[in-house]
Amino acid sequence: MNKTELILRIAEETGFSRKNVELGLNAAINLITKALTEEEKVQIVGFGAFETKVRAERMGRNPKTGEDIPIPATKVPVFKAGKALKDAVDQ
């Protein structure tokens, strides 16, 4: 399911207009993104939690030349599914 399909399904489920659903979904995505850039954890009870983690610097290999190259440390967003979501998917 892509974003457009999600918007359509939410609109059908709630009876809200597609425009209002799109505004709400975009606002939620923007707020989650802003929180993660500020290294704040976003937890949605029953669904899961979004947070950032630091991926340590490591050595990689250039596949073309075989040369070792350093890969710098970076912050990455991660999602951890909540128990209710895990249980729903497992059934």
Image: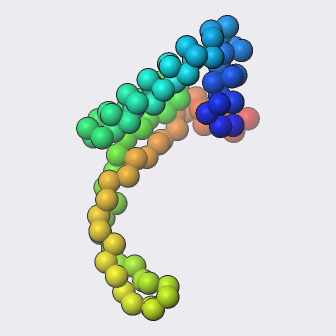
**Is 51 rendered above or below residue 84?**
below
Toward which corner of the image does residue 15 lie, by quadrant? Answer: top right
Left/right placement of residue 69 relative to residue 89 reads: left
Residue, far front: 19
- Which x, y percent locates residue 72? 29, 68
Front position in the image: 78 or 16: 16
Q: Quadrant of the C terminus?
A: top right
Query: Is any part of residue 69 visible from this angle?
Result: yes
Q: Residue at x 55, y 22 (%)?
A: 22
Left/right placement of residue 61 relative to residue 18 reads: left
Front position in the image: 86 or 63: 63
Query: Is any part of residue 41 visible from this angle?
Result: no
Front position in the image: 15 or 55: 15
- Which x, y percent locates residue 33? 38, 36
Q: Residue at x 32, y 53 (%)?
A: 75
Toward which corner of the image does residue 12 lie, by quadrant? Answer: top right
Left/right placement of residue 41 relative to residue 29 reads: left
Left/right placement of residue 46 relative to residue 34 reads: right
